[in-house]
Amino acid sequence: MDLVKEEPLRTTNIQVSKKVDYFPYVPPLFITLILLVGQVSYGILDSYVNVVASIATSVIAEVVLAYFVLGTRKNLASAYVTGISVGILVRSNLLWPYVVTALISIVSKYVVRYKGRHLWNPSNFGVSWMLLMAPLAVAGLGIQWGNYVLPMCIIWFLGLGIVFRAKKIHVTLTYVASFVLLAYVRSLMTGDPFLSELAPLTGPMYQLFIFFMITDPGVAVTGKKWQIIVVIIVALVEFLLRLNSVIYAPFYALCLVGPIAKFIDLKYNSPKTELKTA
């Protein structure tokens, strides 16, 4: 995330200061709220140390890599979001998985690139990689809000406001609608109650997925129509994975579909001159 500044007004004698858009700092505050609500309601954290370690690793890695790879200084709001996402989503009684997952997430932005752009949402890449490669040491967050409706309503209200401000609300709503529809189809196919198929949508894990991972502007394809198509494909792949009892289906679905879609988008729609971004 980078600060967006308005151009100064033209004047002859008076220096007009630039206005700074503070919206990039809203997502870090919002994800911190998710953490606090989840911790107060359910005690979702094994240790605050783990969260601090993942945030510190993300921020330090961002600073070092931005300087040595891109020769610039980055706004650290994005690194904070990545670090705290890892701290919330990863479950382990060891410290090293939090550090390694955060490091992999940030490094992926600078190593796995095409035409100067990274292809994966960082935390999605890091968490998916660790869940797949270290299943004995790492698990994913699987808590749902249950009967606590008020926390879920607050998170959804604020989350929808943020993605609306970021012009990505169509992505979130498309995914939610697709999930609900496919949850009903799964219930018909498996015989499980519809509400049990729908329940994961109410958990903190899915709040992060819906409001941060699939709406990440850094890896979004060009055009609202194609963004909607990609998120429907993600939901369909998740549907197939869930039918095959893959526990962390949404992470794997986005990790598979997202970079392919972004690669195709960059190949055919990107300008000839690419800016260095991360």
Image: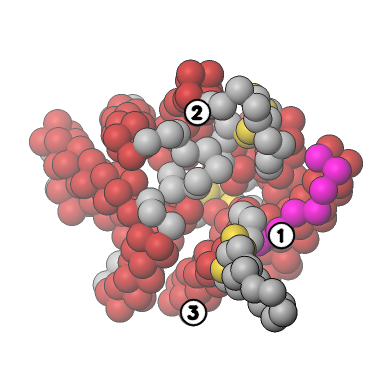
Figure quadrant of the N terminus: bottom right
Residue 82 percent across, percent down from the top left: 63, 53
Label of residue 262 in the image: 2
User: Which label sits in the foreground, 1 or 3?
Assistant: 1
Q: CA distance from mark 1 to mark 3?
A: 26 Å
State the image quarter where residue 144 is shown.
Answer: bottom left
User: Which label sits in the foreground, 3 or 2?
Assistant: 2
- Earlier sequence position, callout 2 versus callout 1: 1
The colour scheme applied to this rendered structure is secondary structure
Q: Residue at x 59, y 46 (%)?
A: 123
- Magenta region, mostly helix, strand or loop? loop
Magenta stretch? 70-78
Figure quadrant of the C terminus: top right
Q: CA distance from mark 3 to mark 2?
A: 37 Å
Q: Residue at x 33, y 39 (%)?
A: 224
Residue position marked by numbered label 1 in the rendering: 76
**Residue 192 can be seen, yes or no:** no
Element carrying mark 3: helix
Location of residue 6 with respect to 263 vertically, above or below: below
Q: Residue furthest front?
A: 12
Element carrying mark 2: helix
Element carrying mark 1: loop
Residue position marked by numbered label 3 in the rendering: 40
Residue 261 percent across, percent down from the top left: 45, 26
Q: CA distance from mark 2 to mark 1?
A: 23 Å
Q: Is residue 199 left or right of residue 3?
A: left
Q: How many marks?
A: 3
Location of residue 174 with respect to 134 vertically, above or below: below
